[in-house]
Amino acid sequence: AADESVGSMAKRLSQIGVENTEENRRLYRQVLFSADDRVKKCIGGVIFFHETLYQKDDNGVPFVRTIQDKGIVVGIKVDKGVVPLAGTDGETTTQGLDGLSERCAQYKKDGADFAKWRCVLKISERTPSALAIMENANVLARYASICQQNGIVPIVEPEILPDGDHDLKRCQYVTEKVLAAVYKALSDHHVYLEGTLLKPNMVTPGHACPIKYSPEEVAMATVTALRRTVPPAVPGVTFLSGGQSEEEASLNLNAINRCPLPRPWALTFSYGRALQASALNAWRGQRDNAGAATE
Amino acid sequence: ILAADESVGTMGNRLQRIKVENTEENRRQFRELLFTVDDSINQSIGGVILFHETLYQKDSQGKLFRNILKERGIVVGIKLDQGGAPLAGTNKETTIQGLDGLSERCAQYKKDGADFGKWRAVLRIDNQCPSNLAIQENANALARYASICQQNGLVPIVEPEVIPDGDHDMEHCQYVTEKVLAAVYKALNDHHVYLEGTLLKPNMVTAGHACTKKYTPEQVAMATVTALHRTVPAAVPGICFLSGGMSEEDATLNLNAINLCPLRKPWKLSFSYGRALQASALAAWSGKAANKKATQEAFMKRAMANCQAAQGKYVHTGSSSAA
């Protein structure tokens, strides 16, 4: 997931003391996309931000072409960020539906074969509310429907943030409610499930929860939640890494794939930070570090 | 699962066809024949759904039917719904009654030996049917029933039957079945039902009875498994199809094809048959005690055939329009 918006890239770049310019963002993505053929076995798709879809490397080769030449599918972030839901306790929905069909058609022409749309829910005493769940599920379903009308596979991302002190069980409970609403909405909007991917959070405790859980416990809670809500017709679940460290994200994904419950969908990753944190750190904005950063 | 829970009225229809009077004793006699077959029946049948009256009936030696079944390791279930009621303002659609006092009834049935319940909701395909109201209302009633069962230690069998009446094609049935099942699983989730402790008893996806187009078992299987694939979470351990108006042989052939369908099938795919297990047996019996052996053999034959079909191992014998 290399689709960080300009604002999100600002945060990443400021952490390594690099100025948030279009050129620096281009140089950084170039570091990632110049990975050699070893990457073909590990990465099947890359999610782009709009700007990046039209950028080129130092030799003038469009990034889209570099990625496609490696046999990797190009995707595009199509949502336009979160907006508040009035009358709720700080909850949001996600915008981006206006003119989405035309945008999808253009992105398809420009090389994208899948898209991604992120909705955000949070756990607190009164949240997520029924409205937030229903509204975000509905907007995800509209997005998915429009994508499919334009030959684009929608990645459906209903992220429940790990902010808070709630325990693993509460996250599981909320995740099940959210996913049930998402799949009902997808059914209501006649979305072809076999042509979608799900990008959920893993089921984890809140960041501020005093109880520690093992990867096996995270895996069991996560797979249980998915088994109760995600129809087998969905071919794959690609987890987001959220606030997890690179190593945590890998350990948890591994434990998920070793969970003894039957799992009819592929369980893999759609990671941003968990794939890029070390690379970003190794690069620190210096061309001389590009090789090491790519490695 | 053997669905032997025909209500008094429904048994009346069955018995009338073999010219047997619909008395409690006749109903008892027929059920006795089914329940006292050879012990090996427990290789093919894991559960029997009973009607209220039958739960308290005994064999000719005075032994309770439910104990006969339990001693063979067969789980006893009980029909819990109390029939249909019209939904005003719809095109002759219905919901199902039976929620009043259901918790107390479940508790009593549990004491009396039942370990699972069954509740049949009915939806039909026709002009403007099934309507949103019918789908939502029946899904909600099923979820309430399931929730109450689980509160009382009974496993709920959830039966949202889309009936085959009509001239619609198989594709239309698939579309409707997907909408209905999506609503059912959303309602079960809303009502906090523990999916791992439920079974689904759906219709197979077939054309309407009056549809002129004919479909093969493989087509029925692909449409059926696709619909389930798109709606039934993997947490549901088993799906036991109803036979509806299908002949015994068709019910077996279709179940076999379903188990051979190449799509991922994370739930067990088996049967909960009424007519498709009993039609030949009923005809062989014709109300005469002298026909006991023929009756029991006819039943055993279908039980074993469906057991094979539930593993995709059934070898077709005889014509598909039998019984």
Image (cartoon, coloured by chain):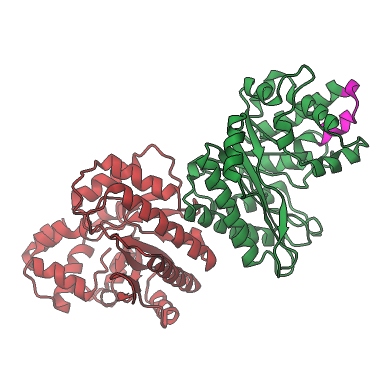
Residue B128 image-quadrant placement: bottom right
Rendered colour, chain B: green
Question: Is residue A58 visible to us here?
Answer: no
What x and y, as percent, mark residue A171? Answer: 32, 52
Q: Main secondary structure of the magenta part?
A: helix
Magenta includes B289?
Answer: yes
Residue at position x 46%, y 46% in the image: A264
Name of the residue lying farthest toward the right: B19
Relative to A234, A66 lies left or right: left
Residue at position x 66%, y 35% in the image: B1
Q: Nearer the viewer, residue B322 or B318?
A: B322
User: What's drawn in magenta, residue-wise?
Assistant: B279-291
Rendered colour, chain A: red
Query: How many tags in the picture?
Result: 0
What x and y, as percent, mark residue A276? Answer: 19, 59
Residue at position x 24%, y 44% in the image: A251
Residue at position x 57%, y 45% in the image: B262
